[in-house]
Image: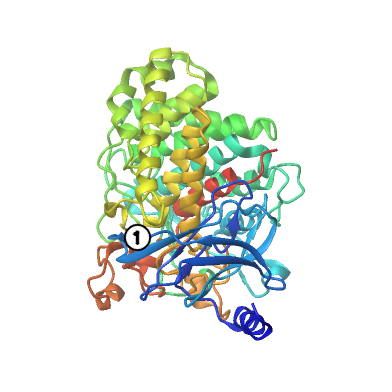
Amino acid sequence: MNLLALTLASFFAVTTAPTTAIKVDQVGYLPAAPKVAMVVASKSPAANFTVRRTKGDSVAFRGKLSDPVDDPDSGDVVRAADFTKLSERGRFYLEVPGVGRSWDFDIAPDVYARTYYLAMRAFYGQRCGTAIDLGAEFPGYKHAACHTLGAFHPSSGKSGPHVSARGWHDAGDYGRYIVNSGISTGTLLWTWELFGSRIKEIGLNIPESGNGTPDILNEIRWNLDWMLTLQDEDGGVWQKQASEQFAKFVMPEDDHSVSYVIGTGKEPYKSSGATADFATVAAIAARVFRPYDEAYAQKCLRAAQSAWTWLDRYPDVLFRNPPGVRTGEYADPNCGDERLWAAAELWRTTKDEAYERYFLKHFGEYLGAINPSAPPTWNNVAPLALWTYVLGRGTNQEAVAAIRRESLRAADAIVQRAARNPYRITLTTQDYVWGSNGVAANYGLQLLVANAFQPEPRYVQTALENLHYLLGRNTFSLSWVTRVGEHPFRHPHHRPSGTDANPEPYPGLLSGGPNQRRQDPAMRKLPKLPPAKMYLDETASYATNEVAINWNAPLVFILTGALPEK
Ligand SMILES: [Zn+2]
């Protein structure tokens, strides 16, 4: 290269703005893991690419692009840039002659630590019933105490005031719903149980920090405390505590509506899905909190057991919003899987044979729920029920063997599907639904649980491929976690972000992501596009760009699974 060419090359490298045509995980990659970027260019790019050090633009790696592959889900023609062999620590970007340069990314063993911190701390930002303040790190991100006025709704079977304290705002709205709290809190408790040593020392800079309990548990307890207030004296649990209508787009403290305890409208008023989900997380909490607060652990266990007793009497009470109520419904036509998960967690905590008998009597009905195209979700918790029996060292060898077999078979199929996908992700065409990014994260959870059954590098690697997708290696080159990466989405359907004076949204929130069904008015302007392209970074698009605790929770799970082992 002559001097002029060298000068031009470095000028090009320094001054060119990043292009969406080159898709990288904008957070980065683990040194020993596969590292692939995607290149989507309308005209044929050069055959080669380079990875350069951000500081000084020197070349760290040279490679060849793969042949182009059609991706029907996005409509993209995708070339892969594989730089797995680059294991040097540092900050880099990718350059493709004739195409441009990527956003920066890091290669480091703890590359996801900051993203974990933001994604987990996002739950603090969702706290209800208290003032929150993200502090000097995010000045101006704060609100006063909210939704402290609580009362029984006529549908609850009771009347008068009822405490409204603690809990997390569910999503972009201010409701608190037991069913969605169930899987979200359960997923976070599992994060602790599977990977606790990796995050035990990571402070979240929350009011409880330094109290001797790990901060992830401090944050989880905020929501557990609210869930405990929705249990009636007979053990049953009401579906939700929320206003009758969704609040306008206002800050939480400016929503003065009453937070009603809402029930089914007729005897027994509580619902089986909510009661079972409550029993599940209270049972997990009973074993998780034992080393830190024995009295609290006992309280959670008693609550879980009385909820289970209520379910004996009322196994199938379904919930639909009563007349005049339009907030989140989380209606599930089948509570059998919720009861199975409750039995499994109660057994795992107590080793009481009664719970195991229930589990062993029913688990076979749900084995098919462990499959390669349906990771767990709020209305499908059967996989979690089955997995906890194995994770808790179930003694029935036949059951353990069947659950392990189905789990590994599904994980193998997911891995093989991702290997064929031009973006290397596990999503099927059908998975581009409301909350598809949550589906991607829950596939990651499914793979990491399989890895816990039988360590297999491909399971972990494929979970990481989905993480790369969420952090920028997608058709939009967008990081779908607010304030993470150099090119994140900016307009979540999230009331505090959409209302306050700050130009940027609250940090650490995962977008719902592409949704092939036009399920909100903002989506009407979208032409018919491939499913992975059906997305709007607009506050109004709640069907593609809302945030939710049950999507952030599996994001936290896979981020934690990618942190260094300790
Ligand atoms: Zn609130």
Seen as rendered, the residue at the extreme front is: 2
Seen as rendered, the residue at the extreme left is: 528
The secondary element bearing badge 1 is classed as: loop
Q: Quadrant of residue 42?
A: bottom left
Image location of residue 401, percent across then percent down: 40, 18
* Residue at horizontal 33 percent and vertical 63 percent from the top: 532
Image quarter in which the N terminus is found: bottom right
* Residue at horizontal 26 percent and vertical 69 percent from the top: 529
Is residue 245 visible in the rendered image? The answer is: no
Residue 539's place in the image compared with 277, above or below, is below
Disc 1 residue crowd, few under 14, some 14–19, many 20+, Cα 10 Å: many
Q: Which residue is mark 1?
A: 327
Q: Nearer the viewer, residue 40 or 494?
A: 40
Q: Quadrant of residue 483?
A: bottom right
Image location of residue 40, percent across then percent down: 40, 69
From the viewer's perspective, tell me whether residue 163 is left or right of residue 330: right
Image quarter in which the C terminus is found: top right
Is residue 221 visible in the rendered image? The answer is: yes
From the viewer's perspective, tell me whether residue 92 is left or right of residue 136: left
* Residue at horizontal 62 percent and vertical 82 percent from the top: 5
Q: Quadrant of residue 411?
A: top left
The amino acid marked with disc number 1 is Thr
The mark total stands at 1
Image location of residue 474, percent across then percent down: 43, 63
From the viewer's perspective, tell me whether residue 333 is left or right of residue 276: left
Image location of residue 174, percent across then percent down: 46, 62
Q: Nearer the viewer, residue 29 or 282?
A: 29
